[in-house]
Image (cartoon, helix red, strand yellow):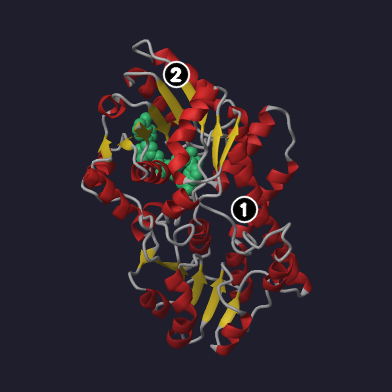
Amino acid sequence: MKIAIIGTGYVGLVTGVALSEIGHNVTCIDINPEKIELLAKGISPIYEPGLEELMVKNIEIGNLQFTSNHIIGLKDAEVVYIAVGTPQGEDGAADLSYIFQAARDIGQNITRDVVVVTKSTVPLGTNYKVKELVLLNLQGNHSVEVVSNPEFLREGSAVYDSFNGDRIVIGADNPEAANLIEEVNIPFGLPIIKTSISSAEMIKYAANAFLATKISFINEIANLSEKVGADISEVAKGIGQDERIGSKFLNAGIGFGGSCFPKDTKALLKISEEVDHDFHLIKSVIDINEKQKINLVEKAKERFGSLKGKRISLLGLAFKPDTDDMREAASISVARNLIDEGAEVIGYDPIAIENAKKVLPESVTYVNYIEDAIKQSDIVFLLTDWKEIVEKALILSSLFMDQPIIFDGRNCYTVEAAKKYHVEYISIGREPVI
Ligand code: NAD
């Protein structure tokens, strides 16, 4: 099938590559000409394991092309995916300006009947507005249907998730449009759930809100555990064995970040406010997360009295391992708070340093090797559990620091391991190792 994708970010690019891999002819369109230039050369502008190889393979076969020109990209497309950003607006609601522009672009440039598929995360009712806008801008006499097809991929394993996801949700009010999009997706061999458009829009927000709730819940239990002498690792294991609870998303830490949970929980709150629904629970989830972000900074202040002049390395800057995405990363608020306290901050990340430079305070300095970060530090903050960082931070701190001390925001080590290496170790929800 001839498919166009609007937006080649984490979702659009991975979707385009995955659809080309299952045999569709895909053209990815982006308004950012630099991205398109890289993509046309077979270079992925984002770091995502396995993506570039699959992309190059499908460019060479002739299944995948890139353009910044909507006329070229939308010509003859039977299905058009919208995968543009829906960032948080000033009032907390999703900013839909990119979605609406994409809808106008589609209306003005399609050359045949089309099914528009919204992959972006959008508030209830948005798909109807997309349809209206496409129709309003139509240049010919074409039929237009919309389908909501929310995306559940996880950055860092996005390619794997595209072929191994738990389900594909197809939300449509028109059965023929739903069947067409089912046909597009059948080669993935994944369970397909067909719903109404509104339910599909709600499924995405409900899924992210539930996961964010699980994180804030375990973080609150962790904070309480510290006060009453329980160990959150043991508690999480003990509750996670219960199949009704499940062991995933029970890792206590310094809160959730990234491009989805923070903005989607706030957007859901906004959606509920607009219909006069007092959503207490999601408000608390957001508040707990805000406090949790500075948990380690507070602990460091308590331990040292003042952080003025302390050299503190942040190990891991991306919001999670295996991605270069810095959106709402914990490192941002930690770096700001430490600098406000007068500390000197050194940043290390295996992949995300270039992106980090764009969002962290200017005074942060960067090193290319974890060894250099630790050698220069009075204090280590472990913020992202990249495999390399987990493997090296404890050992290197014990080797290179005069008085080794790690504040661990991801609970990477056991209390026993920290004791064995004689490292002072402060983590989340567990007794400090002094
Ligand atoms: P992104 O910001 O990485 O990419 C969006 C891309 O769209 C950019 O490259 C931008 O240049 C392009 N664009 C904007 N307007 C355009 C237009 N009119 N025509 C062509 N290109 C245009 O965003 P993302 O992280 O891929 O997220 C996209 C959507 O998917 C969001 O709604 C997000 O909430 C949702 N989502 C993201 C993830 C994730 O892990 N990143 C997971 C699930 C869902």
| Element at label 1 | helix
Rendering quarter of residue 408: bottom right
**Do labels 2 and 1 touch, CB within 8 Å?**
no
Tell whether 317 sits left or right of 415: left
Q: Residue furthest top?
A: 141
From the Cβ of disc 2, is ligand 1 less than 8 Å away? no
Q: Tell me if 170 is positioned left or right of 228 in this view.
A: left
Q: Residues within 10 Å of mark 1 (few under 14, many from 20)?
A: some
Left or right placement of residue 276 versus residue 26 in this view: right
Which residue bears the numbered disc 1? 290
Residue nearer the viewer, 170 or 209: 170
Image quarter where ligand 1 lies: top left
As displayed, is residue 60 above or below residue 251? Answer: above
* Residue 348: % across, % down: 40, 67
Quarter that holds the C terminus: bottom right
What amino acid type is highlighted by mark number 1?
Answer: Glu
Q: Is residue 186 above or below residue 251?
A: above
Q: Does the beta carbon of the residue at mark 1 sit less than 8 Å from ligand 1?
A: no
Q: Residue 289: in sight, yes or no? A: yes
Q: Please name whichever residue, 305 or 137, is drawn nearer the observer in this view of the structure.
A: 137
Residue 392: x percent and y percent?
A: 44, 78
The residue beneath circle 2 is 144
